[in-house]
Image: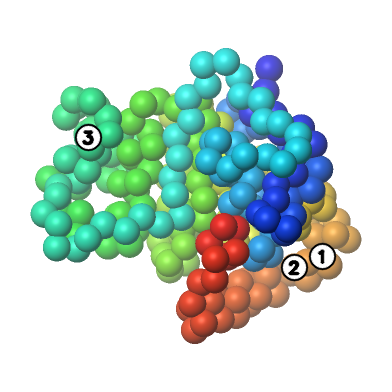
Amino acid sequence: MALITVEDLSVRYGANTVLRHVDMSVEPGEIVTIVGPNGSGKTSLLRAIIGATSPSAGRVLLKPGLKIGYVPQKLHIDPTLPITVERFMRLTNRVSRKSCAGALESAGAHDLLKRQMSQLSGGQFQRVLLARALINRPDVLLLDEATQGLDQRGSAGFYQQIEAVRHKTGCAILMISHELHVVMSASDRVICLNGHVCCEGSPAVVASAPEYRALFGTGTGGALALYRHEHDHHHDHGDNSQEAAE
C-alpha cells in the first residue's frame, strides 16, 4: 500500500484555484521530488498532505498509522533567545538526550547538541531541523525547499545527507526543490507541477518531456537562472500573501 495517496485534489484560496485535479502517490522507501515555477501550488500540496490546508475537492489518503516528519522552508527563532540545540529538539518531543543525539547524528550534525541555536550557520540550522523531523522515526519525510538560502555546496551536502537518511532508515522522502541539477540525480521520481501535474516519471523521462521543457528550458542552467531571477525579485519586492500561501 502507498504511504500517501492524493486523489483528484483541488485547493482554492478564495476565488483563486492553486491546484486542480492532482493525482499522486508516495511508495515506501522512494524519493519523490516536486518541481515547478513559483505559484505552481507546490507548498499548497504539502500543506494539504499534512492537513494544514483543506482541499476544495478530492482527498488525501494516508496509510494507517503513518508517521510523517516535516522540515519547513524556514523557521524564525529570535536570535536573542538563549536556547541550545538540545532544548530546541525537545520542545515538542518528550525524548531523551540519547534520542536527540542519535537524530542529530543521522542528520550529519552530531557535534551540535550543546550549541546555541543563534550561533548556527544556515546549513547547520537546516540539519537541526532535519534531525528534529527524524526524532520520531518517520515513515516519510516531507521537505519544503529545505535548502533555500544555502549555497550550492551546502545544498549538495544537504541532499547527500537526505540520501544517507533514506539508506539508513528506509523512510520515503517527498520534497520540493528548485535545484533541478541536484533533483535529477537524487530522485527516484519527479513530479512537475504547475497548478496541475504537467508530467511525472523518472528524472530522465521528465527532463525530456515537452511540458517540462516549456517550463524550464532544455538545460538546468535556464531553470536555475529563472529561480535566481525570481528569488531576487521577491527579495526586492517582499513576499505577498499569495506567495506565502504557495
Q: Earlier in the sequence, mark 2 or mark 3?
A: 3
Q: Marks 2 and 3, how far apart in space?
A: 41 Å
- Residue 220 in picture, x, y percent from top left: 68, 67
Q: Quadrant of residue 209?
A: bottom right
Residue 225 percent coordinates (x, y): 63, 77
From the viewer's perspective, is 93 left or right of 215?
left
Q: What residue is shown at x 62% (from left), y 33% (from top)?
A: 30
* Whether residue 204 can be seen here: no
Q: Amino acid at mark 3?
A: Arg
According to the picture, the residue beneath numbered tag 2 turns out to be: 216
Inspect the image, locate mark 1, and give the three-letter code of the amino acid beneath it: Arg
Up/down of 104 relative to 115, above or below = above
Query: Relative to 159, does residue 100 appear above or below in the rendering?
Result: above
Mark 3 lies on a secondary structure that is loop
Q: Residues within 10 Å of mark 3 (few under 14, many from 20)?
A: some
Image vertical order of residue 162 relative to residue 118, above or below: above
Position of the C terminus, as image quadrant, is bottom right
Task: Please identify the quarter of the rendering in which residue 28 is found.
Answer: top right
**Residue bearing the label numbered 1:** 213
User: Quick check: 185 above or below 95?
Assistant: below
Dots 1 and 2: beta carbons under 8 Å?
yes
